[in-house]
Amino acid sequence: MANRSASVRREPVRDDEAFDVPAAVLCACCGQPDCAGCAAATDEGSGVVAIIPWERPFGGVWSRLWATSKATTLGAETFFAALPDGAVLAAMRFALLAETLAILSMVVALLPVAALALPGLTLELARNPAARASALQWLAIGIPGLTVWMVLAHAVHGAALELGARRQGARPERRRALRFGLYACGWDLMAGPLGALVMLITGGLKGAEQILSASLRVPGRASTALLLGVYALPPDAAERARRAGSIAALVVTIASGFAAIAIVVALS
């Protein structure tokens, strides 16, 4: 009876325990810890024992999205140090949904501010159907475009960390690096108005302050956890790889942002 009780999986009791880390992440088919998945990866699973809430076959979309986003932010070290290999499509769906909700909530939060700051424009949009249609058209184009750009920026960050780790002598982990970038989109959802509002409702002011404070530190903490846990780099090498990867990702992101702005200006 004691053995049976010990084998029962306990429920998470802390915020960072939404991401359950077993003693070893084993392939469901061959039982090896370093297997990328014997069976062909599907959109619903990662090819290994699913420990990421989003990739579990049970639970609603919002509950899995929120649990994963919370784990990537409040439990970043635990989450990314043990990030399993697996299918990219599931992580991509998570990234697109998280970024879409983050950007939509930001737009909703900023619209009243813009209306108060620009009353003339607000009146023009209210009176002029053509101007209103044009504004809605730009929103319809801009929100998906910004969503894709943010997802790509996070993916570039993961690729840059992969490059930095390999320059320090680590073995390639391209798919995990990409999954790192995609699941890192959970940071934006948690740091945005929607994440802050949900944390305020569920955890009060303390919860909102906790998530905002964690959001400021999470990129560095998560990157270091990935380099130490997945790439098995020593601390000094991990720091060099993190620094180089962050700089490369920042340069690429800024350059692509200016390119996107130039395209918008050219088309307008």
Image (spheres, grey):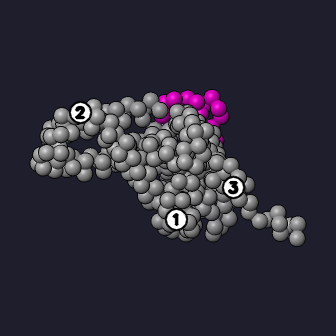
Looking at the rendered image, the disc whose residue lies closer to the viewer, 2 or 1, is 2
Q: Position of 118 compared to 176: left or right?
A: left
Q: Position of residue 158 (x, y in %)?
A: 47, 43
Amino acid type, residue under disc 1 in the picture: Gly
Pick the residue in front: 96 or 166.
96
Does dot 3 land on a helix, a strand or a loop? Answer: loop
Name the residue tied to disc 1.
60
The quarter in which the N terminus is drawn is: bottom right
Amino acid type, residue under disc 2 in the picture: Leu
Q: Position of 5 compared to 50: left or right?
A: right
Amino acid type, residue under disc 3 in the picture: Pro
- Is residue 230 shown above or below 91? above
Name the residue tied to disc 3.
12
The mark found on residue 118 in the picture is 2
Q: Position of residue 256 (x, y in %)?
A: 31, 37
- Is residue 47 shown above or below 223? below
The mark found on residue 182 in the picture is none
Disc 3 + disc 1, Cβ < 8 Å: no
Q: Which residues are magenta?
A: 232-245
Q: Is residue 237 magenta?
A: yes
Does dot 2 land on a helix, a strand or a loop? Answer: loop
Seen at 23% across and 33% down, the residue is 118
Q: Residues within 10 Å of mark 1 (few under 14, many from 20)?
A: few
Residue 213 lies in quadrant: top right
Of the numbered discs 3 and 1, the one sitting upstream in the chain is 3
Determine the main secondary structure of the stretch shown in magenta: helix
The quarter in which the C terminus is drawn is: top left
Seen at 70% across and 52% down, the residue is 13
Real-space Cα distance between discs 3 and 1?
A: 17 Å
Residue 124 lies in quadrant: top left
